[in-house]
Image: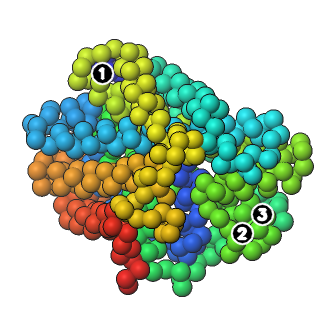
Amino acid sequence: MANRGGFSNKLGFILAAAGSAVGLGNIWKFPFEVGNGGGAAFVFMYLGFCFLLCFPVMVTEIAIGRKTQLNPVGAFKALGYNNWKFIGLLGIASGVIILSFYNVIAGWAFGYFFEMATGNFEIGKNFGPFVANVTKVGLYAILFMVLTAFIVSRGVSGGIEKAARLLMPALIIMILCLVGYSLTLPNAMTGLKFYLFPNFSAINGATLGGALRQAFFSLSLGMGALITYGSYVSKKDNIVSSAAFITLTDVGIAFIAGLMMFPLVSYSTQGNMSDMEGGAGLIFATLPGVFETLGPLLGIIVGAFFFLLLSFAALTSTVSLLEVPVAYVVDEFKIRRSNAVILVAIVVFLFGLPSLLGNGAVDFFTNNFALPFGSDSSATGYSSDFLSFVAKIADTLLLFGGLAISIFAGHVWKKHNLDEEISFGFENYKTSLVRKLINLGVTIICPLVLFLLLVVVLLSNFAGIDVFTMF
């Protein structure tokens, strides 16, 4: 156990775990979920779901990790529930799957940083050919994986924690700088009004479902990352307050990212927010053209700065995604960390090759993986590339993992064992109101809501049935 290392203090853990939660989705997905889901009304719903549903699961995962000081698989075995180790295996599988395609997208962002730095504003118009260029994108993806592997190979305090202490403050400073600049652009206030003022008419079943999914998926739940990070946490640390800071950091960064993105969108659409495009299309296809309008020098500076920001956001997540399977290999097979990192990084990169090839380079991986199964992607608009396919598989596995963990904690491991572990570092926990929230969450609310959400996702991803449109 002593050779596993650990976080040097509570702040190091919070920054590392928050870095795991903060990723590309905070920059390009959350703002547009907010914009399309009623503005500030969506934010309030999102916050509610984060603390009522996700918070109990987060605390539970950290508690299981700290109790056992092992990886997600070893943790359940150490607790005496060998039959439940499948939860850890699914979590590790989810992390490997996510990292395999996430590293490809990180390679796009990393590549765009170099393209912007050299003044290639035309890259936005050539996004399709760029992602289909296996040689170029593959090189960027390799470089990104090597950087991720280097950080993880340095250990918990010497690598992951040091990187988080550098990357997280840098990430926040970069976003704030871009917020400050974007607010000076024409039509910036139109974008902010769209983003911040509630539009209650936009709230419906789909909005509620979107807020719930965004809350769960944005906090790194269900894939063993927080069990793994929790295994490096001291018994002296209050994991309840740590989980609260992690949640608030993730939400806060996502929120200020919206303050950056919507003025840029409003500027690019000349104030016509109905013409906005979200997601990868906006980031990789539209924004380079926006940066070009700022002039040769300023455009290069702002554009390169923006994609460096994206790369930093991606790196904080890829580090935690790689640490999960590495911890499993180190704990279960007694392999040196440096060797485990090399082995796992190679396996993950190879598993990500179909995602790399499925963006126009190879027809089979580009056009034969439509979900729902058997659908005509050209007629329905469903993505048929391998990357989108495995992303939906990973989403489903994460939900199942979160559901299984809440059932395990509330009905198998039992509340009194969970209470005992959380009490370390939180002397008055057993008489606190937060204990009632966590116990109610893991025994009733989380299993019920996550089961319903899992059914909705299964119907949507694999049957093409959007439950929310029925109401």
- In the image, which disc is placed on residue 377? none
Q: Nearer the viewer, residue 471 or 417?
A: 471
Which amino acid lies under the numbered mark 1 shown in the image of this protein? Val
Residue 302 point in image, percent of width and height: 79, 46
Of the two numbered discs 3 and 1 on the same chain, state the one appearing first in sequence: 3
Q: Give the residue drawn at x 59%, y 58%.
A: 279
| Pointer 2 with pointer 1, Cβ within 8 A | no
Q: Please tell me whether mark 1 sits on a helix, a strand or a loop.
A: helix
Of the two numbered discs 2 and 3 on the same chain, state the one appearing first in sequence: 2
The answer to whether residue 406 is seen in the rendering is: yes
Which amino acid lies under the numbered mark 2 shown in the image of this protein? Gly
Which amino acid lies under the numbered mark 3 shown in the image of this protein? Ser
Residue under label 1, please give it: 330
Image quarter in which the C terminus is found: bottom left
| Pointer 2 with pointer 3, Cβ within 8 A | no
Of the two numbered discs 2 and 1 on the same chain, state the one appearing first in sequence: 2
364 left or right of 197 in image: left
Q: Single out the residue that lies furthest toward the front.
A: 363
Q: Nearer the viewer, residue 48 or 240?
A: 48
- In the image, which disc is placed on residue 268? 3
Residue 125 point in image, percent of width and height: 75, 52
Q: Please tell me whether mark 2 sits on a helix, a strand or a loop.
A: helix
Q: In the rendered view, would you say 326 is above or below 250?
A: above
Task: Determine which quarter of the picture holds residue 191.
Answer: bottom right
Residue under label 2, please give it: 191
Query: Looking at the image, is mark 3 or mark 1 nearer the viewer?
Result: 3
Q: In the rendered view, would you say 78 is above or below 122?
A: above
Residue 77 point in image, percent of width and height: 14, 34
Number of residues whose C-alpha sits closer than 10 Å to that of mark 1, classed few (under 14), some (14–19) or many (20 or more) = some
Q: Please tell me whether mark 3 sits on a helix, a strand or a loop.
A: helix
Q: Mark 2 to mark 1: distance in Å?
A: 48 Å
